[in-house]
Amino acid sequence: MKEAVVLLAHGSRRQEGNIQVEDMVKQIQQQDTKERKYTVGFLEFAHPTPDEGVKELIDFGAEKIIVVPLFLIAGKHVWRDIPDLVQQQKEIYPEVEFVLTNHLGENKKLIKIIIDMIESGGSH
């Protein structure tokens, strides 16, 4: 089964922020040991939109699309907008399996990352 991943981000009016997300997605793809295609979808202010990102993955031939919300808290986008978006994509592409992961803030490993940041005193 051909897998692909769309990472959803809020999007920013400042292009620099969107470029940071795109660069992170490229790094994730480079480090992934599986042959999956990755793209980003911005909910607001930038392109590609989630619909455009999914279309890119469909054109790639994805049979399974993993949707990863890059959000720290479960606000409106996480609890309403993203599930609605995934449901719409399921209806448009019924032959494709869509899997919605938990949002980033749900991952317990994030606590260790924050502690590491604090202990490093702000150094990268």
Image: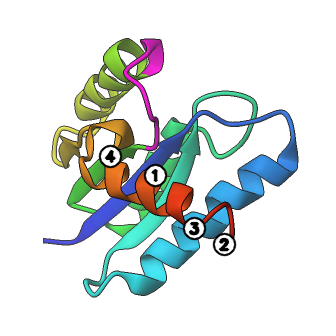
N-terminal-most mark, 1 or 4: 4
Identified by mark 4, the residue type is: Val
Q: Residue at x 21, y 44 (%)?
A: 98
Q: Which residue is mark 3?
A: 120
Q: Which percent across, then down, holds residue 26?
A: 56, 74
Q: Nearer the viewer, mark 1 or mark 4?
A: 1
Q: Residue at x 32, y 67 (%)?
A: 61
Type of secondary structure dominating the magenta stretch: loop
Q: Nearer the viewer, residue 42 or 92?
A: 42
Disc 1 versus disc 3: distance between alpha carbons?
A: 10 Å
Q: Nearer the viewer, mark 4 or mark 3?
A: 3
SS class, disc 1: helix
Q: Which residue is mark 1?
A: 114
Identified by mark 3, the residue type is: Ser
- Residue 67 vs 76, above or below: the answer is below
**Disc number for residue 7:** none
SS class, disc 4: strand
CB under 8 Å between discs 3 and 2: yes
Q: Which residues are magenta?
A: 70-77
